[in-house]
Amino acid sequence: MYPVAISSTGLFVPPHVITNAELVVAFNAFAEQENTAHAAEIAAGTRQAIPMSSVEFIEKASGIKRRYVMEKEGVLDPKRMRPRFKARPDTEISMMAEIAVAAARQALERAGKTAADVDGVICAASNIQRAYPALAVEIQGALGIQGFAFDMNVACSSATFGIEMAVNAVKCGSARAVLVVDPEITSGHLAWKDRDCHFIFGDVCTATLVERLENAPPGAFEVLGTRLLTSFSNAIRNNAGFLSRAEDRDPDERDQLFYQEGRRVFKEVCPLAAQHISGHLASLGYTPAQARRFWLHQANLSMNQLIARKLLGRDATPEEAPVILDEFANTSSAGSIIAFHRYNADFKPGDVGVICSFGAGYSIGSVVVRRT
Ligand code: CO8
């Protein structure tokens, strides 16, 4: 068995920003347009008026202030309310592969490594853009990596579950190094017409280079352990898939996009996540107080504050549980990796931290690391 490390991470940030104010203007124009078009039914009581959204609610309920997206005009067009992506020919790199390659190149560069040092690519994300050929194989080809590549989806926990797969491959010797990439283009599957969730998500891509500790650069993070947990729940769901066409579904039908019972998720997931992290740390001989930082999944500010409070018995400082969701919104599986990417430079040799994701499934994944 080889000791394993996270050598580096990479981050691709999409070119466009949508602020809460811009989002709310577009949503409210859409709501007014729909309510005007259906004024008679609303007056007759046969249809509900669409209620307006508000910046104040979004910031208070979630802590999100803005989000990055691959394309914003389509999202902000009240007559469209979804991004406008140009279909690419099969001869051109696909959009998710393109952003994954950008993040992966950054991770390789930061570790001082090249494609020749890597034996595998895992593309781990919530809404992978096609069934086959696997995105990971396209990314592998574009990077010039030999060996194997495959896709996997565990929603918000895709990245941590992908890291566990990579850690196991490296630990057992089937690969010297594996790149885990998380192209999360959530804007394609977000219900921008639903005020309960139109503000939640953003686009991004992260990459994590997992390799043998002996090959890792100075300052790499040794992986002390990974732990995964799943428990079935319908509270976060998206029914779109390869049977939708045979079910004669309209791609715009509400259940063909992201939907959730946000409050239920909040109540059920927070205790599970806190218990998972403290159990994982205990199995490695640490208490939560001995961890310098928790790089938590970035879905909701109060959720992270509550989980940190359950772990520490007091409020966490921003250094102990860094927040990136104000800038990025919920980027599904990439959130905890962005937090790790942005906030690890101050770690001293021996400092311990926990990367933890939680979300649809339910699924929870944790990675305990120690700076070398
Ligand atoms: N503007 C104004 N008012 C609003 C708005 C809005 N935009 N939205 C809702 N309201 C109203 C509601 O209608 C409600 O009104 P009333 O009291 O009259 O019924 C009131 O505000 C309160 O609503 P909620 O109870 O829903 O508000 P909460 O305080 O619970 O906040 C949140 C809602 C922010 C959604 C919160 O519950 C939350 O963050 N929960 C956690 C959810 C979570 O973490 N989910 C994880 C999902 S991510 C995941 O697993 C990955 C999936 C794959 C990604 C795919 C991407 C497309």
Image (tube, rainbow, N blue to C red):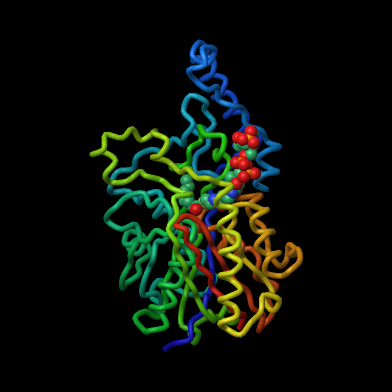
The front one of 117 and 6 is 6
User: In screen coordinates, is 242 left or right of 31?
Assistant: left
Residue at the location (63% across, 63% down)?
342
Residue at the far left in the pictured view:
246
x then y, percent, for residue 296:
60, 63
Look at the picture and state if 194 lies above or below 39: below
x then y, percent, for residue 123:
39, 61
The front one of 355 and 52 is 52
Report which quarter residue 140 is drawn in: bottom left
Residue at the location (68% across, 53% down)?
302
The front one of 313 and 85 is 313
**Quadrant position of the C terminus in the picture:** bottom right
Query: Is residue 67 visible to the viewer in this orientation of the structure?
Result: no
Look at the picture and state if 93 lies above or below 252: below
Q: Taking the image as four quarters, which one is ligand 1 found in?
A: top right
x then y, percent, for residue 273:
57, 64
